[in-house]
Image (cartoon, coloured by chain):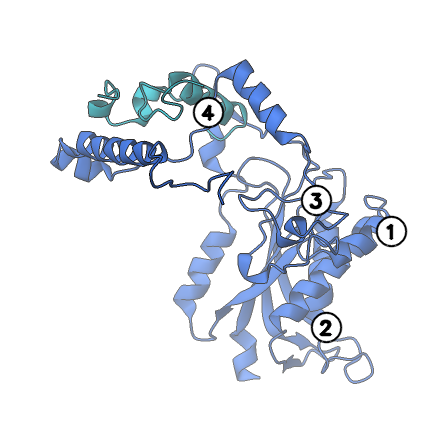
Chain colours: A blue, B cyan
């Protein structure tokens, strides 16, 4: 009881839905509440009328002033019973929280007609559906400084001030909006969770990668290139634009470049010399650096 | 393709770098279109393959 009065968990729930017409705040609240308020120890029969202690902060916009609302939740590590008693509860497991939020969010979107039931079913099979939640930030009961810092973070500006410009002449502030379509969502697939068969099984709908997935190399019938005739398309692009894509930029700390004025030029010369050696070796016919197409 | 199909240096790639800066600005990743002179160390701006 003493511990649970002030102990709390800070959770972050993030959704990638671009439908600004939704009553997002109430939806986020109910979706965040459902997994946070669930606990095997908090069944209606055992604890009738129990309510989780939650304060939700909705950051309406993402850094690109797009509608990408994360919800920060300050959650007490327990629940209030109907008779105003507070009971401490074990932490909600991370996987339980994330999956619960994801399922609640998709159900909410279907209920409001923003998502079809068919798409909901398919999104449940995805590894990443752009709705995520974590509860890794924990505040100890006696950590007053930590609570103050957390509150300051929660009350920050609702959108990125870096994207705002102020015109003194007209006294108007404006924000550059993202030119990306608002309905598009992307999520980065952590390499640690990548499964060799994920593309073939349909868990990944599309990917941009330097390397082809193994299922493509094996000739899986349902996996293919977006541009099957990619070589001709690339050649056409080069003919039209003259662009041969730059793949690397070399960066040097400014302070080093200032202290050693010779450094940038010397690094450039070194890379140029290295490339010349590599190209010269490509033309070496006695010992080929690449596979010989007519090799025996 | 040219003899040196992969030229190094800002002076050798103005068209590609201009396009990069333009796309970067068009997609709201930069508040204004950044000039190439701002991107590279001044001592390297005039470098060309030697």
Tell me the subunit letter for badge 4. Answer: A
Query: Crowding at label 2, few (<14), some or many (≥20) Cα neighbours within 10 Å?
Result: some
Give me the disc on residue A244: 4
Q: Are marks 1 and 2 on the same chain?
A: yes
Tell me the subunit letter for badge 2. Answer: A
Q: Residue at x 53, y 83 (%)?
A: A2
The answer to whether A110 is drawn above or below residue B33 in the figure is: below
Q: Are marks 3 and 2 on the same chain?
A: yes
Disc 2 element? loop
User: Which one is in front, A43 or A126?
Assistant: A126
Q: Residue at x 16, y 34 (%)?
A: A263
Q: Quadrant of the N terminus of chain A?
A: bottom right
The answer to whether the residue labelled 4 contacts the one labelled 1, judged by CB atoms less than 8 Å apart, is: no
Q: Are marks 3 and 1 on the same chain?
A: yes
Instruction: Tell me residue A111's x, y (percent).
Output: 86, 51
Read off the residue under disc 2.
A38
Question: Horizontally, is A251 left or right of A84 in the view?
Answer: left
């Amino acid at each position: 009881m003493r511990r649970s009065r002030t102990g709390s968990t800070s959770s972050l729930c993030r959704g990638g839905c671009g439908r600004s017409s939704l009553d997002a705040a109430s939806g986020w609240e109910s979706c965040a509440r459902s997994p946070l308020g669930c606990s095997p120890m908090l069944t209606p029969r055992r604890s009738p009328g129990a309510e989780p202690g939650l304060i939700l902060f909705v950051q309406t916009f993402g850094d690109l002033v797009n509608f990408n609302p994360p919800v920060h939740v300050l959650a007490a590590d327990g629940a209030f019973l109907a008779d105003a008693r507070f009971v401490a509860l074990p932490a909600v497991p991370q996987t339980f929280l994330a999956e619960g939020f994801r399922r609640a969010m998709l159900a909410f979107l279907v209920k409001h007609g923003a998502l079809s039931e068919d798409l909901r079913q398919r999104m449940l099979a995805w590894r990443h559906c752009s709705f995520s939640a974590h509860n890794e930030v924990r505040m100890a009961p006696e950590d007053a400084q930590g609570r103050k810092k957390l509150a300051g973070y929660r009350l920050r500006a609702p959108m990125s001030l870096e994207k705002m410009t102020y015109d003194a002449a007209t006294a108007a502030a404006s924000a550059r909006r993202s030119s990306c379509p608002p309905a598009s969502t992307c999520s980065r697939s952590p390499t640690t969770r990548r499964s060799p068969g994920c593309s073939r099984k349909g868990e990944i709908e599309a990917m941009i990668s330097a390397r082809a997935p193994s299922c493509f190399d094996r000739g899986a019938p349902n996996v293919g290139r977006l541009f099957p005739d990619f070589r001709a398309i690339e050649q056409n692009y080069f003919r039209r634009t003259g662009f041969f894509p730059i793949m690397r930029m070399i960066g040097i700390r400014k302070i080093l470049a200032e202290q050693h004025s010779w450094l940038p030029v010397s690094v450039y010369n070194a890379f140029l010399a290295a490339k010349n050696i590599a190209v010269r070796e490509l033309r070496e016919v006695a010992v080929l650096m690449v596979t010989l197409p007519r090799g025996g | 393709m040219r003899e040196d199909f992969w030229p190094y240096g800002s002076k050798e790639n103005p068209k590609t770098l201009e396009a990069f800066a333009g796309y970067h600005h068009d997609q709201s990743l930069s508040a204004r279109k950044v000039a190439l002179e701002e991107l590279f160390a001044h001592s390297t701006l005039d470098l060309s393959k030697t």
